[in-house]
Amino acid sequence: MSIETLRPNGIGWTTFACQGDSPNWKCVDEVISDDKATYVYTGDLTGLTDTYLLPDHSAVGGAINYVKVYFRISAYAEGSGRAAIHIHPTFYYGAWHVAPDLGKDEWETFSEQWDISPFTGLPWTWDEIDTLQAGVSLKNPIGVGTCCTQVYVEVDYISIPTVTTDPATNIKALLATLNGTLVDDGGYTGVLCGFEYGLDDTYGTTTPTEVKTTGETFSQSIAGLLPNRTYHFRAFADNKTTTYGSDRTFTTRLGGNPNIDQLIYQHVERMTR
């Protein structure tokens, strides 16, 4: 698995007071929390929400496992905070967490995880990540300060696998062996590897798959081919995202008896129509 971390880089749909740098997102964007130096805050009794723009993703990623929002808070009295996200455009919230004592300069980081897009009920897409805003809701039961000093988002995803198509071997009149290498499994256990093949580069036939990990080779013997014909093939790897190796070709051989070759050719061609 891989993780891309996204930190605030602009003002979102809602905003409130900021102590220190301005605008609000600059108070919560630091990699290492500066706690009391810069923070956003509110004394609202029922809760206000502060959201931030995020950069577009840079990862060359496959399927997204989850999105997790982290926020670091502190408060006088028993103030509390919760993660907030904005998408499609709708607000969604995590659970409330009681903040530690701001008077003692105590801070704590909480998080909320969304395994699927709360708007669609389906797995997250990278397009959704690029429109996502994240932030925090803060409240305080006696109307004094509840503060947030840091917000960031982690996108946990499966990296796209890398596979190569290796030269075919054991080429006969009616059969051949296709070969490939799983260069990188993308950190995913149980990548399914196989081949597509056919008489042109639209392929049309798919072999059974094998489970492989990074660096392992795989092969499939195929039969029922036509003699003296050129076949195209390519390897593929599937770890929830399917990628392909380059197209390769091989030419089946003639047998020792041209008459038998012709009969075999005609028979197989009738069977494959």
Image (cartoon, grey):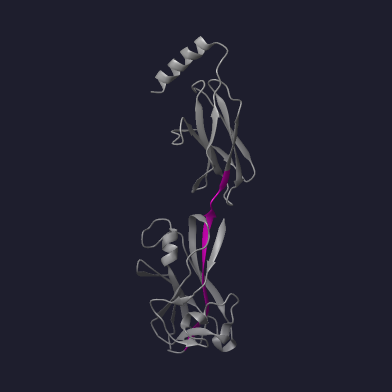
Q: Please state, as top left, top right, bottom left or bottom right, where the N terminus lies in the image.
A: bottom right
Q: Is residue 211 visible?
A: yes
The residue positioned farthest toward the left in the image shown = 89
Using the rendered view, name the quadrant where residue 163 is placed.
top right
Which quadrant is the C terminus positioned in? top left
**Observer-nearest of 71 and 169:** 169
Q: In the image, what residue occupies the spot 52% across and 86% down?
A: 21
Residue in the foreground of this view, choosing between 200 and 39: 200
**Image location (x, y in percent) of residue 248:** 54, 36
Q: Which residues are magenta?
A: 145-163
Estimate the x, y position of residue 130 in percent, counting from the top left.
44, 65
Instruction: Look at the image and say whether residue 67 sits in the magenta stretch.
Output: no
Horizontal and vertical percent for residue 142?
43, 89
Q: Position of residue 223 (x, y in %)?
A: 52, 24
187 or 263, which lies in front?
263
Instruction: Give the quarter of the image for residue 35.
Output: bottom right
Compared to 129, does 150 lie above or below?
below
Magenta span has 160? yes
The residue lying at 55 percent from left, 10 percent from top is 257
At 56% from the left edge and 89% from the top edge, which residue is drawn?
A: 103
